[in-house]
Image: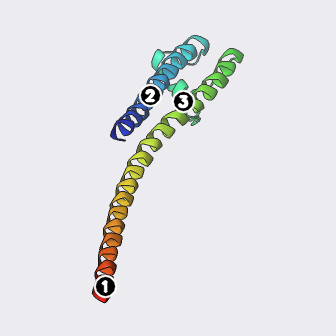
Amino acid sequence: MKRWQDRTQLITRRGLLYSLVLCLLILFFGGLGFWILEPRALTFSDGLWLAFTTAATVGYGDIVPSTHASRAFSVIVVLFGLAVLSLVTASVAAIFVETEERQIERDLMQEIGSLRAEVRSLRDELRAQLNDKI
């Protein structure tokens, strides 16, 4: 049981790590693509900013895709960005849910132990009363 929980926790944390790395790669290549395709993105940091605002679907409007190529590229960045940011959110939520589930499982096991002890006590009490009557 403990080994299974360790594996689940490792997979969940690895999933978060992989999602974050994938997110950074999308932002890096998105920034590079916007820097190459968008004439208004004068520096690589402008391209990164445009990739971030596009992937996060924030769109502040300070830099916007103006060419057909950069607009088509922004569609790709939005689709990948939404997918990967959803994975990051899901991984973080899974870590919180897993922690809460473990606590609930511990509480249930403790309650089951208490109920077993109570049933054992009632059986002993019933046996004692039956022995007194005999």
Q: Is residue 74 left or right of residue 20?
A: right
Q: How is the image coloured?
A: rainbow
The residue under the point 50% across, 22% down is 27
**Along the polypeptide, which appears first: circle 1 or circle 2?**
2
The amino acid type, in three-letter code, at marker 2 is Leu
Instruction: Name the one closer to the observer, 62 or 95.
Output: 95
Where's residue 62, x and y in %? 56, 30
Q: Which residue is mark 3?
A: 84
54 and 18: which is toward the camera: 18
Q: Position of residue 77 (x, y in %)?
A: 60, 24
The residue beneath circle 2 is 20
Q: Position of residue 22 (x, y in %)?
A: 49, 23
Residue 70, numbered circle: none
Neighbourhood count class around disc 3 (C-alpha, 10 Å): few under 14, some 14–19, many 20 upward: many
Residue reaching furthest to the front? 134
Asked which secondary structure carries label 1, the reply is helix
Q: Is residue 79 visible?
A: yes
Going from N to C along the chain, the mark reached first, 1 or 3, is 3
Viewer-side label of 1, 2: 1
How many neighbours does mark 2 have within 10 angstroms: few (below 14), some (14-19), or many (20 or more)?
some
Mark 1 touches mark 2? (CB < 8 Å): no
Amino acid on which the number 3 mark rests in the picture: Val
Q: Confirm whether residue 66 shows in the render.
A: no
Using the image, determine if residue 71 lies above or below residue 125: above
Q: Is residue 86 left or right of residue 17?
A: right
User: Is there a contact, CB below 8 Å, between mark 1 and mark 3?
Assistant: no
- Residue at which label 1 appears: 129
